[in-house]
Structures are given as C-alpha cells and as structure tokens.
Amino acid sequence: MAPRTVDRAYRECEAITGREAKNFAYGIRLLKAPERRALSAVYALARRIDDIGDGSDAPAAKADALRAVKKDLASLDDPAPGDMVLTAIADARSRFGLPVDAFVDLVDGCEMDVAGTTYETFDDLVVYCRRVAGSIGRLSLAVFGASDRPGAVGLADDLGVALQLTNILRDVREDGERGRVYLPAADARSIGCPTDLSDPAALARLVAFEGDRAQQWFDRGLQLLPLLDHRSRACVGAMAGIYHRLLVRIRRDPMAVTRQRISVPASEKIWVALTALTGLTGRMTGARTVSL
C-alpha cells in the first residue's frame, strides 16, 4: 500500500479514537507514535464491530454485518479499497503481528449480544468477557510487547475481563432497559435477586457481589504491568486505573448504579493518566494497594 494511503488511514483511525473513545484515549496518548497509531486502528475496528452489535438494525441485519466483518478480516492481505480502517489494520498487522483471531473473538462476542445470550453461571459470563474485552487485551499486547510473553497474554486477557465486568456493573440499569442481562442467573438466585433484576435493593446486593469478583480479576490482570516497558505500562496503567476508580465508586455505593450511570470525572482521569506516566503505577500491582 502507498505510504500516503497508509498515513491517511491511520489519521482517520486516530480521528475516530479521539472522537469516540473515552477512557481508552487517556492511555493511548501516552504511547509513541507507531504504537499509538496501531492502537488507534485496533480501537477503530473494535468500534465498528461494537456499533453493529449496539445499532438499531434488526438482528438478522446485524448478523449479516458481523459475518461481513469476518470476511473482511480473512482478506486483510487485500483490504477493500477506500476502507481506511481495514487499511490501517492490515499495516498494523504487518508491523506488530496483530492476532487477527482476537478480532474474530470480538465479533463472536457481539454475535452473542445480537442473539440475546444470557448467562447462567459466572464461568459462562467470563467466556463472553474474554471475547469482547480479553480480545482487546491480546491485541494491545501485540503492540506493546512484553518481557514474558506467554504469561503476559493470559494476564492481558484477565485484565480485559476485569474491565468488561466493570462496564457491565456500570451499565446494568441501561442494559436492563434494553432487555440485556449479563449478570449470572445463578448468582442472582443465590442472593434472592429476581433474574430480571427488577428489585433495586436486591440488584445492589448482586452488584456488590460481582464487584468483589471484578476486584479479584483486577488483582490478577494488573500483574501484567511489570512485564511492560515504561510507556506501555503507563498506557495500560492509565486505562486500567480509570476503570478501577470506577469500580471503587461502584463498590462503595452499589445502589447508585440502579439510579444513574456512574462515571469518573475528567479531571480525575487526567490525574490518573499523569500518575501512570510518572511511573507510580507500580503501586497498582498489589491486591490491597490498587489506588489509582
């Protein structure tokens, strides 16, 4: 591909990331240009896939669109002309060895959403989380590199699960209004919560229970940080730190998610990113010292 075309493709992906990303953008800014461009491409394609799953089309149309994405992923040696996102992904794959099968996992996770999949056990939910978020962890790790790659892949996947569980807890009310229920039915029954999550007080108890589990996944996933170089560690530390602060807020007041969408203020996100860049993310690796 012509260098000008590739540069244009990355610029478009960076524009998508700057416009659409929220927590992700705070970390990605801390990377050097080649890694930042590659992760922008990863985000842009992930955004495209998510938008299909979350869109207003009928399920059959969504399923067709997701199958088309899989065909695109199988044709990255010759991406569709004019598709800047696929052009950037193809270049990033050649530079960083992106595991394209991780994108396929992400599509599989979105297909679960389109099918209205619900989850009987926590292990069932983990499968979904690994597909839609662990996949992004594995893709990001390909860009970062790591000093202990075999172990790092598993930790990146675990950290992705922690982030997705936090997302699920944050969005539990909105998802319920759309008919999506992610929290495991067996867990709901065990604490007397209706499986349709219609009782706010019982839902708050379930959120607290799952919040404790999310913290355990953070404790494991954050062991990835020492395996990364300084800038990659800062990037992951910033993104994970923002999500962890969100989880801390949810665990502190589980009832709050039944009333409104919990968020972390922009000023606090900036502070987390600066803290990560100055090298203080090392304090995040202990189970009881995660403070970002």
Image (spheres, grey):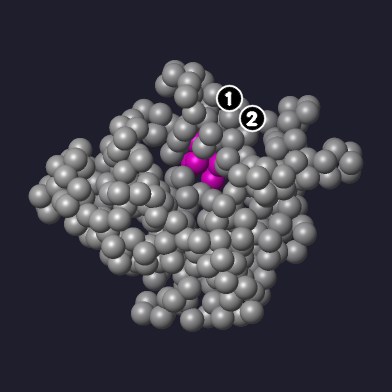
Quarter location, residue 146: bottom right
Q: Which residues are magenta?
A: 102-107
Residue 65 appears in the figure: yes
Task: Give the alpha-carbon distance from disc 2 to disc 1, as whole Å.
Answer: 6 Å
Q: Quadrant of the N terminus?
A: top right
Give the side of residue 84 with respect to residue 240, left or right.
right
Majority secondary structure of the magenta segment?
A: helix
Residue at 43% across, 76% down: 290
The residue at 72%/48% (across/down) is 14
- Magenta includes 104? yes
Q: Position of residue 159 (x, y in %)?
A: 45, 61
Give the answer, above or below, for where 71 lies relative to 133.
above
- What amino acid type is highlighted by mark number 2? Asp
Q: Residues within 10 Å of mark 1 (few under 14, many from 20)?
A: few
Where in the figure is residue 68, as x and y percent of width and height?
Answer: 58, 25
The one of 237 and 226 positioned closer to us in this rendering: 237
Which residue is drawn at the image coordinates 67% and 49% (left, top)?
Answer: 18
Q: Which residue is mark 2?
A: 72
Other residues around mark 2 within 10 Å, as few (<14) / some (14–19) / many (≥20)? some
**Would you name the residue on which mark 1 appears?**
68
Tell me the kind of residue under disc 1: Ala
